[in-house]
Amino acid sequence: MFGRLHVVPRLREFFTRYPGIAVELLMSERLVNLIEDGVDVAIHNGELKDSSLISRKFAATPVITVATPNYLANTASPRVPSIWTR
C-alpha cells in the first residue's frame, strides 16, 4: 500500500527528470538483503536496524488500530497497543 500511495505517483516526475535511468520496481513486505538481492535502493517502513546504511525520510504514514465490533464483543478490549515482530 505504501508503494501505491507514495512511490508510484512520483514515478512520472522521476522519469521526466532522469530519462536515462531504468527502474525495476519490486514491492514486497519481506526484508531484503541489499547486497545478496542486488538492490540499489530500498524503501523501508519502520525502524532502520542496520546503522551502516544511509537513510532519508521519504514519507510519513499514520498508524491506526482498528477492530470489528464482533472481535471486541468476544475479546477483552486492549488497553495499550501491543508491538509485534516478524
Image: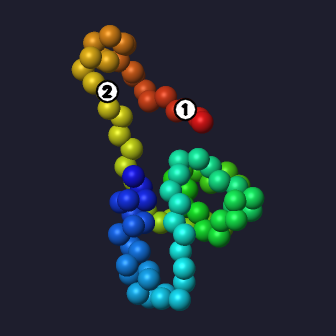
Q: Amino acid at mark 2?
A: Ala
> Is residue 52 rendered to the left or right of residue 56?
right
Image quadrant containing the C terminus? top right
The one of 26 and 2 positioned closer to us in this rendering: 26
- Point out the residue furthest to the left here: 69
- Give the quadrant of residue 10: bottom left
Badge 2 is on which residue? 67
- Tag 1: amino acid: Trp
Which residue is disc 1 drawn over?
84
Residue 60: x and y in percent read 42, 58
In this picture, residue 41 sits left or right of residue 18: right
Of 38 and 66, the residue lying toward us:
38
* SS at mark 1 in the image: loop
82 versus 48 height, above or below: above
What residue is rendered at 37% in x and 49% in y? 62
Q: Residues within 10 Å of mark 2 (few under 14, many from 20)?
A: few
Q: How many numbered marks have been drawn onto this rendered protein structure? A: 2
Q: Within 10 angstroms of label 1, few (less than 14), some, or many (20 or more) residues?
A: few
* Residue 49 drawn at (x, y percent): 67, 51
Q: Are marks 1 and 2 in contact (CB under 8 Å)?
A: no
Residue 53 seen in the figure:
no
Classify 52 as above or below 11.
Answer: above
Residue 8 image point, x, y percent: 39, 67
Q: CA distance from mark 1 to mark 2?
A: 16 Å
Q: State which tag comes first along the sequence, 1 or 2.
A: 2
For residue 52, side relative to residue 32 (left or right):
right
Tell me the SS state at disc 2.
loop
> Which residue is depicted at the point 48% across and 88% down?
19
